[in-house]
Image (cartoon, helix red, strand yellow):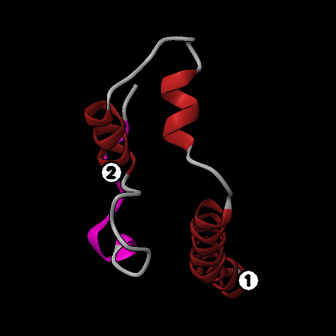
C-alpha cells in the first residue's frame, strides 16, 4: 500500500512539469497580443507605455527561452 502511494506521489512531479510546459508553449503560440485585448477591452485608448507595462507585468517582454529561467510574474488580484 505504501509503495503504491509513494509511486503515485512521485508521478505527480513529471505530470506537473508536463502541464506547466504545455501551458507555457501554448501561451507562446497563441496569435495576437493579450495586452492589446486587455487594454482595449474597455473601449478606451491607451499609450505605448501602458502596453509596455502590461508586457512587463505578464512577462511576455522577455525572450521565450529566458522566460522560464527568470520565473513567473507575480500574481495580481
Q: In this view, does 54 lie to the left or right of 53?
A: right
- Residue visible at 59% across and 19% down? 41
x, y percent for residue 23 = 63, 64
Please identify the quarter of the rendering in which residue 2 is found.
bottom right
Instruction: Give the structural element (helix, strand or loop) at label 1.
Output: helix
Magenta stretch, residue numbers: 67-75
Distance (Cα) linking label 2 and label 1: 36 Å
> Which of these two is toward me, 27 or 5?
27
Residue at image position (62%, 71%) is: 25
Categorize mark 1 by other alpha carbons within 10 Å: few (<14), some (14-19), many (20+): few
Which numbered disc, 2 or 1, marks the residue that appears first in the sequence? 1
- On the image, numbered disc 1 is attached to which residue? 4
Q: Is residue 44 above or below residue 32?
A: above
Task: Give the number of marks.
Answer: 2
In the picture provided, is 8 more to the left or to the right than 45? right
Quadrant of the rendering where the N terminus is positioned: bottom right
Q: Residue 41 lies in magenta, yes or no? A: no
Near-viewer residue (70 or 17): 70
Q: Are marks 2 and 1 in contact (CB under 8 Å)?
A: no
Q: SS for tag 2?
A: loop
The image quarter containing residue 47 is top left
For the point 59% across and 74% down, the residue is: 21
Between label 2 and label 1, give the one nearer the viewer. 2
Label 2: few (<14), some or many (≥20) within 10 Å? few
Quadrant where the C terminus sits is top left
Q: In this view, does 26 lie to the left or right of 71?
A: right
Labelled disc at residue 18: none
The residue carrying mark 2 is: 73
Q: In this view, does 30 lie above or below 11?
A: above
Q: State yes or no: residue 73 in magenta.
A: yes
Amino acid at each position: 500500500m505504501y509503495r503504491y502511494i509513494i509511486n503515485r506521489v512521485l508521478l505527480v512531479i513529471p505530470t506537473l512539469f508536463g502541464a506547466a510546459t504545455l501551458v507555457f508553449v501554448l501561451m507562446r503560440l497563441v496569435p495576437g497580443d493579450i495586452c492589446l485585448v486587455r487594454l482595449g477591452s474597455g473601449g478606451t485608448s491607451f499609450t505605448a507605455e501602458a502596453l509596455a507595462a502590461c508586457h512587463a507585468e505578464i512577462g511576455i517582454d522577455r525572450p521565450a527561452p529566458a522566460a522560464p529561467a527568470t520565473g513567473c510574474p507575480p500574481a495580481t488580484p
